[in-house]
Image: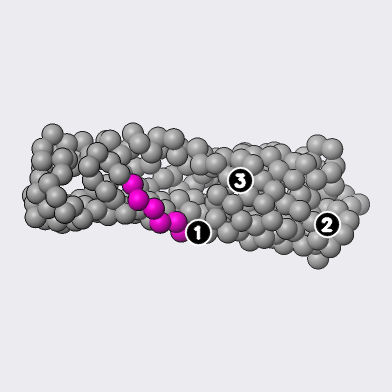
Amino acid sequence: MKTAFAIVAVLCSPVLAPSAHAADLGAGFRVGTYGLSAEFGIGVTPWFGLRAGASAAEVSDNYEQDDIDYDGTLTLGGYGLMADFFPMKGTFRFTVGVLSNRNAIDLEAVPTAPVEIGDSTYTPSEVGTLQGDVEFDTNVPYFGIGWGNFSGKGRVGFICDIGVVAQGAGEVTLTSTAGLVDPDDLADEVATIEEDIEDYELWPVLSAGILIRF
């Protein structure tokens, strides 16, 4: 985390020198694949700005692995600091940031028929309830491009982001409430789930909304 903040500080240092430009302040509100977001922004110069914000959402869905049906709850969002660079002093920007990532998945399955876990088959009474958690890295970098500048004319503007949260590979834990499932079979099931979620290592961020200049 300290390294990530240091990188942002180095990138920002050339533009934090005193300037005749009066800083522009504002707030942004958006919706996207990282949840509902609110942020506070400052346009330090026409070509550099800072944003601090937070995002949150919950999505429920079903996930099937072999013949096991899981009820899944995906928690999205996080909070952190973004640095925006406007190469043409307009609305288009490059963005780097440091986030405290909240992305996580809760899994639960209650078999009603015999199911295969690892190399063995278990009855519903032997399984009870399968309870799983998927956790990703907490302190993560963000990289992206976007449109929207708190240094600008007009009270209301458009804001949009396209980027990725580099949240790492998900770490899965899985337990059986009945306690009769062989730990090696649970480990095999965990390995299979982790393989299925490999694509989530880079979480895509697509969002759009409005900014309000103060």
| Residue pictured at 50% horizontal, 37% vertical | 202
The amino acid type, in three-letter code, at marker 2 is: Ala
Neighbor class of circle 1 (other Cα within 10 Å; few <14, some 14-19, many 20+) is some
The quadrant in which residue 122 appears is top left
Residue ID for mark 2? 23
Residue 182 vs residue 80: left or right? left
Rendered residue at 21%/36% (across/down): 188
Circle 3 residue: 206
Q: Is residue 174 above or below residue 31?
A: above
Residue 33, percent across and down?
55, 49
Q: CA separation, marks 2 and 3?
A: 27 Å
Side of 149 relative to 124 (left or right): right
The magenta span reads 57-63
Q: Quick check: 200 above or below 62?
A: above
Residue type of the residue flagged with mark 3? Leu
Q: Is residue 153 magenta?
A: no
Q: Are marks 1 and 3 in contact (CB under 8 Å)?
A: no
- The residue under label 1 is 57
Magenta-highlighted stretch: main secondary structure? strand
